[in-house]
Amino acid sequence: MTDPLKDALNAFFPSDPVHHPSHYTAGPPCPGCGRPIECIDITRTMDFCLGNVVKYAWRARLKGHPIEDLEKARQYLDFEIERLKEES
């Protein structure tokens, strides 16, 4: 089954596997410009581990391996928790 919204977005914003991969451009439209919000728009200013938590959670249902991506997100969350414990 195809998704008409996804098809329309792909027509206007074609996937670029390096700069704009489809599994990161499937976000909601930006209220200001209408362009789909990309994962990197959210994560670019985060610490590495937290950015990876968001990245893997964001794409969990978009790449065909949701459990694996959520396990990766959990692993990076554990890394961040350990880092914060070591700092305090």
Image (cartoon, rainbow, N blue to C red):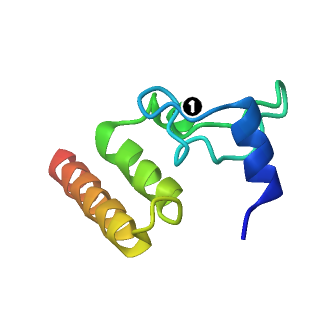
* x and y percentages locating residue 54 in the rendered image: 46, 51
**Residue at (47%, 26%) from the top-left corner?**
19
The secondary structure type at the circle numbered 1 is helix
In the shown orientation, is residue 60 left or right of residue 32?
Answer: left
Pick whichever, 39 or 79, lies toward us: 39
* x and y percentages locating residue 53 in the rendered image: 39, 54
Q: Is residue 28 above or below residue 12?
A: below
Q: Residue pushed farthest bottom? A: 67
Pick whichever, 84 or 55, lies toward us: 55
* x and y percentages locating residue 75 in the rendered image: 25, 63
User: Callout 1: few (<14), some (14-19), or many (20+) C-alpha neighbours within 10 Å?
Assistant: few
The total of numbered circles placed on residues is 1
**Residue at (60%, 41%) from the top-left corner?**
25
Q: Is residue 21 above or below residue 7?
A: above
Q: Is residue 48 above or below residue 55?
A: above
| Residue named by callout 1 | 41
- Locate the N terminus by quadrant: bottom right
Pick whichever, 40 or 49, lies toward us: 40
Quarter of the image where one finds residue 69 = bottom left
In the shown orientation, is residue 19 left or right of residue 69?
Answer: right
**Residue at (41%, 29%) from the top-left corner?**
18
In the shown orientation, is residue 61 left or right of residue 55?
Answer: right
Quarter of the image where one finds residue 9 = top right
* x and y percentages locating residue 74 in the rendered image: 33, 66
Q: Amino acid at mark 1?
A: Asp
